[in-house]
Amino acid sequence: MSVIRKIRSKINHWQAKLLYRLVKTRIIGADTSSLNIDPNKPSIYAMQYPSFAEQIVINKEVGELGWTPPFQQRLTKIIPGSPYFSTYRRHANPFRKDGVPIVAKQLMRQAEWMLEDDERDIQVIPVKVMWGRAPERERSFLKIWLQNAGSLGSRLMTFFAVIFNGRNTFVHFSKPLSLRELAGTETSPELIARKLARVLRVHNRKVTKSVLGPELSHRRTLVHRIPNRPMVRQVIDDEIAEKSASRVKLRAQALKYADEIASNISYTNLRFLDLLLTWVWNKIYNGTEVHNIDQLKDVSRDNTIVYVPCHRSHIDYLLLSYVLYGRGLQLPQIAAGINLNMPVVGSILRRGGAFFMRRTFRDNKLYGAVFDEYLHSVFTHGYSSEYFVEGGRSRTGRTLSPKAGMLAMTVRSYLRDSKKPIIFVPVYTGYEKVFEEKSYLGELRGKEKKKESLLDVVGTLRSLKKSFGKVHVTFGDPIHLTPYLDERQPGWNKQDYSDCNYRPEWAPKLVDDLAQTVVTEINRAASVNPINLVAMTILSAPRQAMDETQLKRQMEAYRDLLAMAPYSSMTVLPNGHASDWLAHAEKLGSVSRSTHPMGDLIQTNERQAVTLTYYRNNILHIFALPSLISCLLINNRRYTFAEVVTSCRTLYPFLKAELFLYWKEEELEGVVQSWLDVLEKRGYICRNDDHYHCATDDTDAYPHMQGMADAMMQTLQRYFLAVSRLKNQGSGNLGAKQLEEQSAQLAQRLSLLFGINAPEFFDKALFRSLIQQLIKEEMVTVNDDDLLSFDIGLNPLIAVLENVLDGRLRQTILNSI
């Protein structure tokens, strides 16, 4: 018997070796270490269709994972029957893709074996082997056909599938099912087997949709359906009635718009991009770290996913798809600006899933209707999508105020048809160096934004010689649209919105709140990398230069501080030591080193200093509260707890609006107390007679507190400048636009006088946000002449700012206005 086992083992070995000369596999889906396979229980593997080639693949992958290989289990005969079974058999017609559902006879024998002893159980592990991942829209008919080799029938078809698609084989393992738990109180082996087969067939459909997405019509069919969709027909009818326009011409224009918009996903193109981007990522990046993706895998099976990432670089368009593709998740349809639909690049992006949209189409009703219907088709088919709620790329490193247009169209589509639940998934992308650093720097210094061109793309190829560090991608907590609507608009799904064209009166306010929630959740998922800590530390130093030892000590102190009081449960901190981080920053060109006999100095030139503000701004919201507390205490002022809380309460609404902080105002007191406790424990502050004060300036803690205070001080200086200008001009004498313009000009002047290397210090958008928040907090009102009015209600804010700011700078601001 042992001889037969050895012969079979040898045969299995050589079969696998021969097959794997043609096959290259990748395990996708859930992390296999999280499947919790019990080595003491026998396992059987549930396949969709019978296939000996798939059995060989499963056996090899299982062995490499350290589980008991099925072929070995078969030789030991722990349980009756084969360790493999299928839930469908191939259809007799090779051109039919749908198989015939079956209940494997061996399942009945194995269920009977389990029922003989109450201590017995069997692990059922669903596994899917995909010879390629092209959906029905793939242009190569042969590859489409062979990708479904399991259902097409015959060993010959499987052979050709291996030949043509074998180098792109994906293996998806799912969490094991306990046959004992599934059986419950059932005692009939046949009924247990039938129940298991039903469960597995449903599970297989969900996995297929999660990986490949639902079947969408061919692009040409989808485009040609758009003119017949309700919203487009209505606009065409209105145009004919109002302007006596030609129906034929309007339909032709609608087709042209649809063709301009629609994506054209090609998995052949994506496989090429996968290889290319893997090479690029390994060439210029030190890899991509992905966090918190497991919950995404759980929710993606039963819901339409809308990814809402932050927007830092053009590489964002490819990065998320690359991450999802490599982990076996459905690729999204990506909203891209029409400016990217340039020769060559536009075609590549479109085939990678991008659909293009014009920057504005408010005055083009037909285009708007076509775009609405295209989005509606995507959502109602259950296909995932991706768009950037910030509108454009952030040039400052901060999360930008959201543009709610795409969210409004999503909600509008949901009011039309909410059968398929929609979930928003915030995504934070943290770069250690972005491709566009040079262009961002120019734009922040006042240069006009340059229009994208093919030559610019070719020019970036020179960047392949440089190193860009590591990229962190963190998936935030999902936002379920149905409960969100239920909470804010009870009974929304029981109303008919067709009369108002699915634009109810309550929708704009709800969409604006949703937009704020999305960007807040993006920030909550932020990660901290070494360049963020280098920037946070060195920019607080005089002349942006520090002793190397002090710099390293301060960076590690900030990391340890965030470890004690993480911003959220998703906050990721850098591993290693400060010496490694500094060496990494030098390699990226973020800082420079000056050797000195008494100890090396780390410094920045003007370009490096301005560039580093981008990476400090990435994490400014994470340090917002400890930085604010540092601002209050740094000048050795003594504050009671109540005074600290009052000052924080006064400033918090403005910081929350600008930095998208997630704490509710009623939670603020508890968060402030937690930070005071941490700062006291770390020796940064002291408490005497119920008063808090900063550690003395002869301790190591003082420069750390000064560094945190400096990170927030420029923001508070902007606030003081704007409200002082408003107060100086008097109530009812300035409009919001005037105050915004004058504040920006004054801030630019101060930045020159005090050497503030932070272009966002005089960013008009930040002053605009401040003015809007002043109005929202009712500290300022807009009168009938659109001028800003105020009374003594503005004084508490001014008083807190006066207490925080340095006296010399405060007086300079007052003299300037």
Image (cartoon, rainbow, N blue to C red):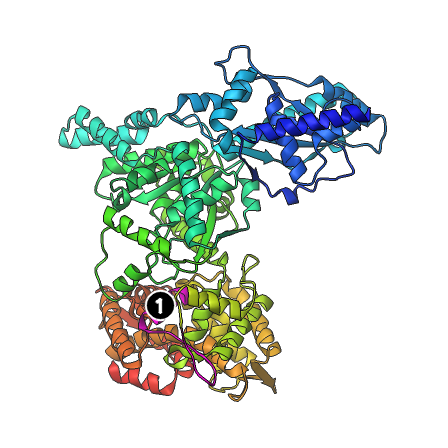
Q: Residue furthest left?
A: 244
The residue at the point 39 percent across, 49 percent down is 316
Q: Examine the rendered structure and indicate whether residue 293 appears above or below residue 596.
A: above
Q: Examine the rendered structure and indicate whether residue 363 appears above or below residue 446.
A: above
Residue 446 picture quarter: bottom left
Q: Which residue is mark 1?
A: 774
Estimate the x, y position of residue 588 in percent, counting from the top left: 41, 63
**Residue interval drawn in magenta:** 593-617
Horizontal side of residue 610 vs 702, given as left or right = left
Question: Magenta includes 708?
Answer: no
Image label count: 1
Q: Examine the rendered structure and indicate whether residue 597 appears above or below residue 107.
A: below
Q: What is the quadrant of the C terminus in the image? A: bottom left
Estimate the x, y position of residue 61 in percent, counting from the top left: 63, 35
Foreground of the two, 123 or 684: 123
Q: Secondary structure at mark 1?
A: helix
Q: Is residue 191 visible?
A: no
Q: Is residue 300 visible?
A: yes
Q: Residue furthest right?
A: 117
Estimate the x, y position of residue 546 in percent, counting from the top left: 44, 79
Q: What is the quadrant of the N terminus in the image? A: top right
Estimate the x, y position of residue 11 in percent, counting from the top left: 68, 25
Amino acid type, residue under disc 1 in the picture: Leu
Foreground of the two, 560 or 725: 560
